[in-house]
Image (tube, grey):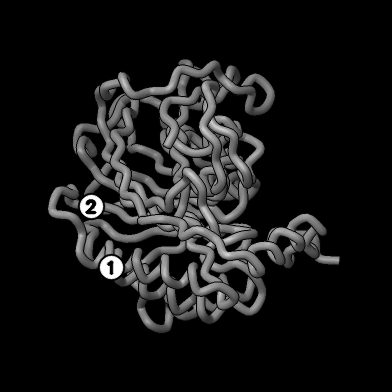
Amino acid sequence: MDSGPEARLMPRPPLQTALRALGDALPMPEPGAIEVDRADLAIAHLPAELEGLTILQVSDTHITARNTVARDLHDRLLELLESPDPSWPAIDLAVFSGDYMNVDGDEHLASDCLRDLVHTSAKLTRRGCFGVFGNHDHAELKDLVRARTRRDGWPVTWMHSDSLEIDGLPLEVFGSDWPESFRAAIANRPERLCDGAPLRLALGHTPDSIGDAHRAGAHLLLAGHTHGGQIRLNTARGVLAGFTASTIVPRRAPSGIYRFRHDSTPHNRETTLAVTRGVGFQLMPVRINCPPQIVLYTLRAAEPDRSGETPMPPEPAGPDGRLEVVRVW
């Protein structure tokens, strides 16, 4: 039996099957308008050339032929990107964080939608588009998308166990579809920790990549996967999230900005982790207190105003690792 990362998803547990049936049978509230959140990311030793660099992140569109809500959300996303708000800053990079399809049979529809998303986003960017795939993106979709990218010249670079430097900028991008293959992406590449070194931007689908990304010398990891919980109840201690899928991100802070530290890394180095709520949904076509989201990040060398941060104690995230919550959205 194929048990590697490219293997198909296992049959759904009975609870998932029941939830899907419930979603098909009952009227569900609309997921809501797609929110555009803006956030400054303070990076230690940020090269001066990268001050103000802006990154657009889109994740978890979960296109499916079984439900028209997903396609409607995708169309609204394209409209949003085709006519951006005049207040948006100039966008340097666009990154796509995976889970473009939902289930078997959605590959061609998801590929068409992803094509439109890539071309629309590329018109906004000055330095290009980069992407990885997620756990819902089966091998058939990956092969199809990569083949169409090569054949039709899609303006995007799909990262997989590799890294590249952005021409004219002290910026290195690396990424992978699966947490464990981050190790291959940085094989025989020394960590760069000194002042003036290139920023190392890691792209991954799941926040669970943070440990390997940190050991790879990443200053910043952009991820999705959690859907922000999708169904949320606000409490005094944070939020209760319904479908948070990550073991690293705490349920009371299922999406937002975090700092990761590990005692084994020198100079008390930290990696910033940013997790978007994403656009789509899983199990049921509904979001409660958790609107669809894209994010515009701006890199800053100085600490931003922390008045809006959520004070929470660090969360364990592996042996000697700690995940500090900076902001929840």
Rendered location of residue 50, percent (x, y)? 23, 38
Rendered location of residue 244, percent (x, y)? 61, 43
Does residue 4 sit above or below 250 in this rendering?
Answer: below
Task: Count up the numbered dots.
Answer: 2
Residue at image x 29%, y 34%? 40
Marks 2/1: CA–CA distance: 17 Å
Q: Which of 79 and 51 lies nearest the eye of the viewer?
A: 79
Rendered location of residue 236, percent (x, y)? 52, 22
Q: Earlier in the sequence, mark 2 or mark 1?
A: 1
Residue at image x 53%, y 64%? 62
Circle 2 residue: 91
Does residue 227 sit above or below 21 in this rendering?
Answer: above
For this orientation, the residue located farthest to the right is 1
Q: Residues within 10 Å of mark 2 (few under 14, many from 20)?
A: many
Circle 1 residue: 79
Q: Which of 168 and 69 lies nearest the eye of the viewer?
A: 69
Quadrant that contains the N terminus:
bottom right
Residue at image x 29%, y 30%? 46
Q: Amino acid at mark 1?
A: Glu
Rendered location of residue 219, percent (x, y)? 42, 33
Q: Residues within 10 Å of mark 1 (few under 14, many from 20)?
A: few
SS state under label 1: helix
Q: Amino acid at mark 2?
A: Ile
SS state under label 2: loop
Instruction: From the viewer's perspective, tell me whether residue 306 is left or right of residue 211.
Output: left
